[in-house]
Image: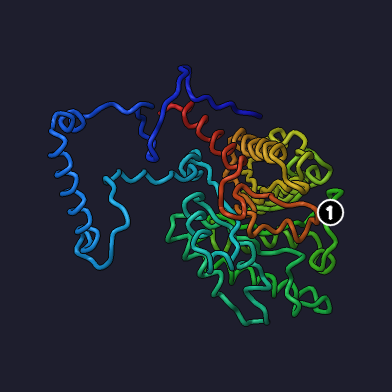
Amino acid sequence: MTEEVRAGAATGTVVRTDDGWPVSPSRVPTSVDRTMSRLPRARVVVLSVVVLVLVACAAYFGWDRGVGPVESVAAPTAKPSPTPGPPALRDLMPPNVRIGSAVNGQMLASDARYRETLSSQFNAVTSENAMKWTILEPKRGVYDWSASDQFVDFAKANGQAVYGHTLLWHSNTPVWVTESWSPEQLRAVLKQHITTVVSRYRGKIWAWDVVNEVLAEDGSLRDSLWLRKLGPRYIADAFRWAHEADPDARLFINDYGTEGRTRKADGLLRLVKELRAGGAPVHGVGFQSHIRLGAPPKDAAGNLRRFAALGVSVAITELDVRIPLPVTTQKLLDQALLYQHMLKACLAVATCESVTLWGFTDVSSWIGSHYPGYGAACVFDEEFAPKPAHGALAQELSARKSASPN
């Protein structure tokens, strides 16, 4: 995708001041010039001397009666208008779809540019870690709500919806939970965790990832502590307990490698059918969408549509596009097309509820530590400058907004 920028149809040379104002290349005589030309040479000399004296006095005493000399005298010029920032994605989204970002807790607490960009660009947020079980309950019965409360308060202050991530994930089970416990003990502690967390934020969180990554690559249920000890029913139970704690929250099942037509996506489709047929309150399916440049998901829009046909909402929950290093202009343009492709895929489905980026700036991206040789996965660079990917998202949304009836 290329874009050619033209200066205009007319040709010619225009000289401009530093402020951008056009002037003629040759200086046009002014009325002062004509007046001075009519004066006798002696008077011109006298007037010149007077002007020099006045300038010297002004320089010595200071034009503003301050202390010290003024180095130069220049006519006041108009201040240039501030450079406009990138278009705010949150202002361009359809009214029924949210645009969100994952939030890094350290950056949120320490970096003003991070907070400003996050609040101005996105109307939904997902905490990367603050709402995970090991963070909230590091010791059994001992809760630490500080980071999660600060995150929710920030979202409320900036008019952002909160997507809770995540109530149950096999990779984030506290160390004090042990497989030596009986199934009854494990079931009780899981129910207590879900009920306690969801109840605390009842009415403050619009959606939850209830279970995260419960499938293996072949589409079968992932081997985990919970499956081994409680059997497949633990998934439906988790949804029921979350719904009891907050009946108004939207409840999602979330996984990776399912955004295109894959064996894993087929397995997820079967699981959602079974859960809903059994009465579990599964309201939506989250597709993480961690994409490698050059490997777009197969038929993303068609894949999302078959889930929507089950009567559930769909959401892109963790979108990023990692680039093989080094970064080049062409790679950034290709990345932009993939971001745009995934946005279009979700918006093409009537039940699309949100599109969330897994971080918006390369300065805090997780990619470098998990995928050696890859990076630059986000829509803003490490200096918070928008990349072509941001422009592609804004362009797609602007075009849709312009085409939609008022």
The image shows residue 257 at horizontal and vertical percentages of 78, 47
Q: Quadrant of residue 314?
A: top right
Residue at (54, 61) in percent of width and height = 246
In this rendering, the answer to whether 363 lies above or below 135 is: above
Task: Kindly state the secondary structure of the residue where label 1 is placed.
Answer: loop
The image shows residue 64 at horizontal and vertical percentages of 20, 60
Residue at (42, 61) in percent of width and height = 157
State the quadrant of the N terminus: top right
The structure's colour scheme is: rainbow
User: Is disc 1 surrounded by few (<14), some (14 to 19) or many (20+) residues within 10 Å?
Assistant: some
The image shows residue 224 at horizontal and vertical percentages of 82, 64
Q: Looking at the image, which is closer to me, 178 or 382?
A: 382
- In the image as oriented, which residue stretches furthest toward the top? 10
Q: Is residue 57 visible?
A: yes
Q: Looking at the image, which is closer to me, 278 or 103?
A: 103
Residue type marked 1: Ala
Q: Looking at the image, which is closer to me, 85 or 128?
A: 85
Judge left or right: residue 403 versus residue 290: left
Q: Is residue 308 visible?
A: no
- In the image as oriented, which residue stretches furthest toward the front? 42
The image shows residue 306 at horizontal and vertical percentages of 71, 36
Residue at (55, 56) in percent of width and height = 125
Q: Quadrant of residue 344?
A: top right
State the quadrant of the C terminus: top left
The total of numbered circles placed on residues is: 1
Name the residue beneath numbered marker 1: 216
Q: Looking at the image, which is closer to me, 337 or 332?
A: 332
Residue at (82, 75) in percent of width and height = 179
Judge left or right: residue 69 versus residue 82: left
